[in-house]
Amino acid sequence: MKIAISTDGDFVSAHFGRCPSFTIVEIGDNKVLGKDVIDNPGHHPGFLPQFLNKEGVNAIIAGGMGQRAAELFADVGIEAVVGVSGSVNEVIDKIVAGTLAGGESLCQPGLGKGYGVDKTECEHPDEED
């Protein structure tokens, strides 16, 4: 199974489409078979699901994404798991152990519109550190 993790540095990005990169990890026989980090090729509706599908990705993990984006991933057979945070390595360990759990999207609808990977700030309500 190939999984794309929206990545910002060493951590899961809160927004799949605006992450600087994706960590592509291949899991098999309860171990990591391969791991590669690729730059985000750009964000516009429908592109990333098609791009990641061509890369052989079966699932995407992110802090959040909108409902329409999740539907576009589902249309190409990619499961979207949102509500995930923490370090990429911790997430990979949870995937291998079978303990990764998703949750509610960390993005609110409409807050990601109007820009792509170039925007560095999101219009989320103030979050406590």
Image: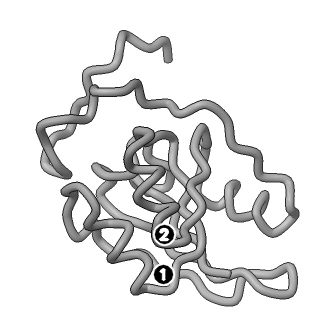
Is 6 placed left or right of 44 in the picture?
Answer: right
Q: Residue at horizontal 78%, vertical 57%?
A: 94
Q: Residues within 10 Å of mark 2 (few under 14, many from 20)?
A: many
The answer to whether residue 82 is above or below residue 26 is above
Does residue 102 appear anywhere in the picture?
yes
Report the residue marked by disc 2.
23
Q: Amino acid at mark 2?
A: Thr
Q: CA distance from mark 1 to mark 2?
A: 6 Å
Q: Whole-percent x and y of residue 29?
A: 86, 87
Task: Determine the image quadrant of residue 50.
Answer: bottom left
Q: Is residue 90 left or right of residue 16?
A: right
- Element type where label 2 sits in the image: strand
- The foreground one among 101 and 23 is 101
Where's the N terminus, which quadrant?
bottom right
For the residues labelled 1 and 2, say whether their Cβ atoms are less than 8 Å apart: yes
- Give the mark count: 2
Label 1: which residue?
36
